Image (cartoon, rainbow, N blue to C red):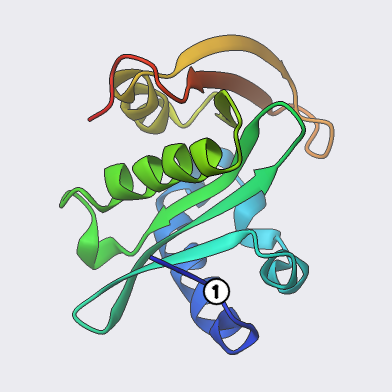
Amino acid sequence: MRLARHEDLAAIVALTQAAYAPYNAILDAPPIPVTEDYAPRIAQGEVWLLESGGDLAGLITLERHPDHAMIFSVAVAPGFQGKGFGIALLNHADKQARLWGLPEVRLYTNAKMERNIALYLAYGYRETGRRPNPYRPGWVLVDMARPVDGIGTA
């Protein structure tokens, strides 16, 4: 796991587009992480890359807040999905939050991304609420949280 650098930007965009592609039809538009400008996030040290055999296998975008860490995006390249890389990325979020001295990791996802919600629940996240997406009318966000030292670490 390493922090992303500016020269990783094109690979980050390509991986994100590929990882989220199955949701384009479900949502009738690209998911928010696909439209994100990652350059500022890279500059702020918010994007970590997971490599395997010299290839970019996945990435996590993690924001530091005063009382929690917020996962903005978890993306695993299609060829690496189903091999535990998503869990490795979530474990990294826990580790980073612990290093930052934060008690909780939070995330939000689209209510239509039921597979992701099930994965997060299995990992130990709990749903904390639902709300309209302020940037995409008609979309509903599912807020989730997990204590850093909580039960359910995979």
Disc 1 marks a residue whose amino acid type is Ala
**In the visual, does 37 lie left or right of 84?**
right
Q: Quadrant of residue 87?
A: top left
8 or 100: nearer the viewer: 100
Residue 16 locus on image (x, y percent): 50, 64
Residue 105 locus on image (x, y percent): 55, 29
Q: Quadrant of residue 78?
A: bottom left
**In the rendered view of the protein, which quadrant contains the N terminus?**
bottom left
Q: Is residue 103 above or below residue 54?
A: above
Residue pictured at 63% horizontal, 37% vertical: 70
Q: Residue furthest bottom?
A: 7
Q: Is residue 76 above or below residue 38?
A: above
Residue pictured at 82% horizontal, 39% vertical: 135
Determine whether the residue tagged by mark 1 lies in a helix, strand or loop: loop
Label 1 crowd (10 A; few <14 / some 14-19 / many >=20): many
Inspect this view and state whether residue 47 appears.
Answer: yes
Inspect this view and state whether residue 31 appears.
Answer: no
**In the visual, does 99 lie left or right of 125?**
right
4 or 14: nearer the viewer: 4
Q: How many marks?
A: 1
21 or 119: nearer the viewer: 119
Residue 80 locus on image (x, y percent): 22, 62
**Residue position for label 1:** 4
Residue pictured at 38% horizontal, 16% vertical: 150
**In the rendered view of the protein, which quadrant contains the C terminus?**
top left
Q: Residue furthest right?
A: 134
Q: Quadrant of residue 152?
A: top left
148 or 144: nearer the viewer: 148
